[in-house]
Image (spheres, rainbow, N blue to C red):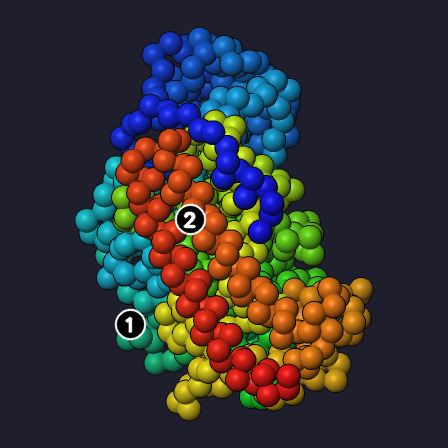
Amino acid sequence: MKKILFTLLTLTVFTLSSWAEDGHRLWLPAQKSQTAHVSTNAQSATIDLAKQELTDYFAGTKATLLIDPALTDDEGFTINGNEDSVVVRARRDIGLLYGAYDVLRRQAIQGNMNHVEQHPRFRLRMLNHWDNLDGSIERGYAGESIFEWFHLDEALLHQYARANASIGINGSVLNNVNASPKMLTREYLDEVRKIADLLRPYGIRVYLSINFATPMVLGDTRTADPKNKRVRQWWKRKAKEIYSIIPDFGGFLVKANSEGQPGPGDYHRTHAEGANMLADALAPFNGTVIWRCFVYGANHKGEDRVKQAVSEFKPLDGKFRENVILQTKNGPLDFQPREPYSPVFDQISETPNMAELQITQEYTGQSHHLVYLGPMWNEFFQYVEPEWLAGISGVANIGKDRNWCGHHFSQANWYAFGRLAWDPSLSSEDIAKEWLGQTFSTDENFVYMMSTIMEESRETCVDYMMPLGLHHIFKFDHHYGPEPDGFKAEYPLEWCPVYYHQADANGIGFDRSSKGTDAVSQYREPYASMYDKLETCPENLLLWFHHVPWTYQMKDGSTLWESLQYHYNQGVINVETYHNIWHNKMRHYVDEQRWREVDDRLEDQVQNAREWRDVCLKYFGGFANKKQ
């Protein structure tokens, strides 16, 4: 724990006026203005939204929105002016809306409004909703789906669209990657049209996850073989139908031959053959197929799970149609608190790729833990260059809870995803300060203390859950608590925690060196050599790549077992400190409802962190203490 947080406990704080808040407004402006006059040189539904936002919330006297054909032809914008009068220019109308929101963001945090120029780094900036047709959400921790089929809440969807547009998100996949074939029936497509119409003025295109076996499941074909003529014709007819209903439909997201989902492999076809069939159907309408690389199991018996995506897709690189994008998780396993970056980004060069991040905190405490993911994503972009990517997607953490995300601080992860999807060079610390200033308070003491906590929170989570490269030792199914002894004969071994930590009397960790599974060889240099050697492997990934003796001497002189104990204990101490700071110092800065709700969540987090420490140290100590 940094000394700064302990010294901050002694700061004197001043009581601020209280106000009623429940978190529903997110980071968007709270107080309407009655003074601003806004003029434009063009009209559209999108420009009308930009004009309305500035009319309602700009605290100055004058704002001007100008379509400027001389500017770069993208979704970017320029801002010139000050807190009283601003001019926003853009080549496209959506750029004016993004610019209007940037003006309001800068107003809220007292930022500069002169000589600002912004351009999105990624063309595709998408949310992936894992929402089911019955209203449930897979890995959702904030209530039921906001997409209430046949009973759509238009006001709620407008608020959703506004929040996304304010951070530059321009795509939304409405349903779970474990998709129901019903999603492509006419009755659901008519509902999708309504959502598309609501989101369109905010610059958001809709996409759908599809079940690869849809034509067969619906009874229209006898097979889903991508080489079957009737199947190919069915998809072409379906694409034509979709675009007749939703002319700007974005395309399909596909999870195939993974975790029991159907796919081309069921017919001894490749991922490229399956994706290309769909791509051919969408191509006449400029639609895109986004094909997930999260594939493991069936064809890779005995192969290290973290190697399987490269094994599956590298031989197919360059064999996909031009309108196919591969979507790859940031790490090679499954959204762990810490993973090395996925080597797919090193090995796939001829096919467009986009990164998939997980905003919903499946493995980082869900809606009960304050874990800010911005530092994790900054870390990812230290290894994966933005120019390698066609886009970026995030598994959404949004539900019908009043505060949208289940935990008030989980909103920061939605916000940070959007900001990094727009500009991955932004620092997580600056984003945290932006979010705090817009969401809670601009008081310097508050922002300093809470941004420090947010910045440390991810590393703290790693410490009390799985330090030094440990991974996937969660309880089965729900992934909330620890289960390092987890083994179920009816499960594939690669789903069991004991497969990943491989603790025994000699040591702990998964040997992925050149002497083990050789997963290190999938990385580019210098990382392949660095990870391969025990002496040069970063200690925060040590047990990811190596089976290490309990008595191994760490860089600080401690043994591996002593270091594990230190990290687990330090993680708990940090969370206890976060709770103490919030409980004793933050009440003066925050309204009562949100203070209390965050306080309750932090209390839960303290208890869960202690559980992780106690369970893991007891279990691993049963091996380590035999060697002491």
Q: Amino acid at mark 2?
A: His
**Farthest left residue?**
151
Q: Quickly name the residue at label 2.
A: 579
Residue 14 seen in the figure? yes
In the picture provided, is 544 more to the left or to the right than 20?
right
Q: Quickly name the residue at label 1.
A: 218
Rate crowding at label 2 as few (under 14), some (14 to 19) or many (20 or more) other CA atoms within 10 Å: many
Q: Position of residue 330 (x, y in %)?
A: 58, 60
Q: Toward the viewer: 25 or 181? A: 25
Instruction: Tell me which residue sits at (50%, 26%) in the image.
Output: 109
Indicate which disc, 1 or 2, sits on the residue closer to the N terminus.
1
Pointer 1 with pointer 2, Cβ within 8 A: no
Q: Position of residue 428 (x, y in %)?
A: 58, 43
Instruction: Tell me which residue sits at (58%, 51%) in the image.
Output: 1
Residue 252 seen in the figure? no
Indicate the quadrant where residue 39 lies.
Answer: top left
Query: Marks 1 and 2: which is nearer the front?
Result: 2
Instruction: Tell me which residue sits at (47%, 29%) in the image.
Output: 12
Q: Amino acid at mark 1?
A: Leu
Looking at the rendered structure, the secondary structure element under dot 1 is loop
Looking at the rendered structure, the secondary structure element under dot 2 is helix
Locate the C terminus by quadrant: bottom right
> How many marks on residues?
2
